[in-house]
Image (tube, grey):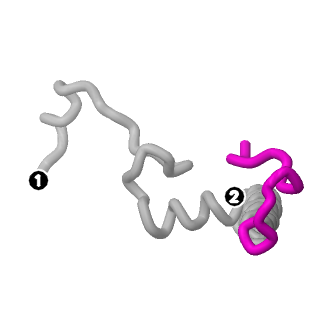
């Protein structure tokens, strides 16, 4: 996953410090990403059973392919029955 698996093999202390900070930051980013995904995925009763991510998609991308509510496609002959 990381470019350097064993940071202790690097001889230069400043380089070792920079790499360990990078790896620590990457680990923090992964942990925060997992935490945010875990927090945003549960279904909430306040949102009628939708998760926060699904509510975001409903509000910001209502016609997108990932939106939990999709429009039904009608056969061509049923479109002619509508009065416009």
Reading the image, the residue beneath label 1 is 84
Which of the 4 image quarters holds residue 18?
bottom right
Magenta segment main secondary structure: loop
Is residue 31 magenta-colored?
no
Instruction: Say how many tags the image has.
Output: 2
Element class at badge 2: loop
Graded by Cα atoms within 10 Å as few (under 14), some (14 to 19) or many (20 or more), the crowding at tag 1 reads few
In the picture, measured across the screen, residue 77 lies left or right of residue 12, that is left
Residue 15 placed where, x, y %? Answer: 72, 68
Going from the N terminus, do you reach mark 1 or mark 2 first?
A: 2
Foreground disc of the pair 1, 2: 2
User: How far, Cα to Cα, is label 1 from label 2?
Assistant: 34 Å
In the picture, measured across the screen, residue 8 lies left or right of residue 55, that is right
Q: Which mark is residue 39?
A: none
Residue at point 42% right, 59% down? Answer: 62
Residue 7 placed where, x, y %? Answer: 83, 55
Q: Which mark is residue 50?
A: 2
Residue at point 88% right, 55% down? Answer: 8
Element class at badge 1: loop
From this view, report whether residue 65 is shown above or below residue 23.
above
Q: Pick whichever, 73 or 58, lies toward us.
A: 58
Residue at point 17% right, 25% down? Answer: 77
Q: Which residues are magenta?
A: 1-15
CB under 8 Å between discs 1 and 2 = no
Q: Pick whichever, 34 or 1, lies toward us.
A: 1
Whether residue 5 is visible here, answered yes or no, is yes
From this view, report whether residue 7 is shown above or below residue 17.
above
């Amino acid at each position: 996953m990381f470019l350097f698996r064993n940071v202790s093999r690097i001889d230069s202390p400043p380089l070792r410090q920079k790499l360990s900070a990078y790896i620590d930051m990457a680990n923090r980013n992964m942990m925060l990403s997992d935490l945010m995904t875990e927090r945003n995925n549960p279904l909430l009763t306040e949102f009628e059973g939708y998760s926060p991510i699904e509510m975001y998609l409903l509000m910001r991308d209502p016609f997108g392919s990932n939106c939990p509510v999709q429009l039904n496609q009608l056969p061509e002959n049923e479109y002619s029955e509508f009065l416009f």
